[in-house]
Image (cartoon, rainbow, N blue to C red):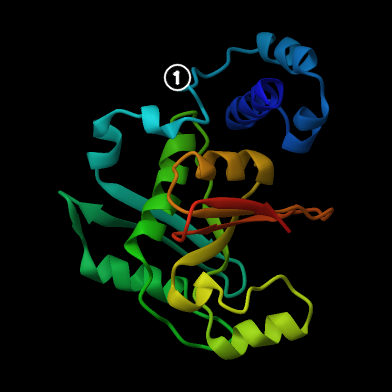
Amino acid sequence: MSSRRSVLKKSLILSAAGLFMGVRTALAQEPDSSENTATKHKPLTPPPDLFDSQALDLDFWLKPRTLDLVRPASGERVQLLYWKDGEMLDSAYQQVCHLLRDVNGKKAAAIDPKLLETLWATQAFIARLGMTKPLEILSGYRTPESNQRLIEEGIPAARKSLHLEGRAADIRIAHLHEEVLGELIQSFRQGGVGFYYRPSAKGGWIHTDTGLQRKWKG
């Protein structure tokens, strides 16, 4: 476990520093080869433990929160401050709920603020390493009809999915391996994390929700 996490840590550090285009290459290498690559450049200083976000200082959680989200299905992008001085900014919250709407069902719903906290923390955490990429929302809220359609089409979707309650999102970040992303999100201990690996050019995605803490691969 420690060896695998060591490789994942180095993958995120190298990706954040822009040392190579595909993080999957780093994951396939032995730890020593990743280390040799890193020593040829000046690496960014990682936080104390990349996969123990609970070690973050209180200031991290109290500072203003800005989200940078992209919705590939609709071509939309929002960059907005949604939380400041301990309060949600309503107009910004409504914009985020709209972005996380059911694009196919053309319906929006209230999104669990804890889910937004996870999305923000993920971006803010990797930004500490100098990696500032928008977070892609592949799926947010789903209507029952849209969820049922996915099930009938053989696409991974639970019958009692938390997407139906605005408590889940399927996400990815360009050039960041889904395993690295998933391990990071899991460290926030906010709910369930599903790892969906796919052999495509853009790779797979990570499901994150605010339900019980659990982990699975799909």
Task: Pick the quarter of the image with the N terminus.
Answer: top right
Residue at x-position 73% and y-position 59%:
218
Q: Is residue 36 above or below residue 50?
A: above
Question: For residue 41, what is the image quadrant?
Answer: top right
Give the x, y percent position of residue 111: 38, 70
Q: Amino acid at mark 1?
A: Pro
Q: Is residue 148 above or below residue 123?
A: below
Give the x, y percent position of residue 157: 66, 73
Give the x, y percent position of residue 13: 59, 25
Question: For residue 58, what is the image quadrant?
Answer: top left
Report whether 165 appears left or right of 131.
left
Secondary structure found at label 1: loop
Residue at x-position 39% and y-position 54%:
67
Q: Is residue 134 above or below residue 31?
A: below
Report whether 38 appears left or right of 66.
right
Residue at x-position 23% and y-position 40%:
62
Circle 1 packing at 10 Å, graded few (<14), some (14-19), many (20+), is: few
Report whether 163 appears left or right of 147.
left
Report whether 212 appears left or right of 139.
left
Residue at x-position 54% and y-position 39%:
184
Q: Which residue is mark 1?
A: 48
Is residue 162 in view? Answer: yes
Is residue 22 in view? Answer: no
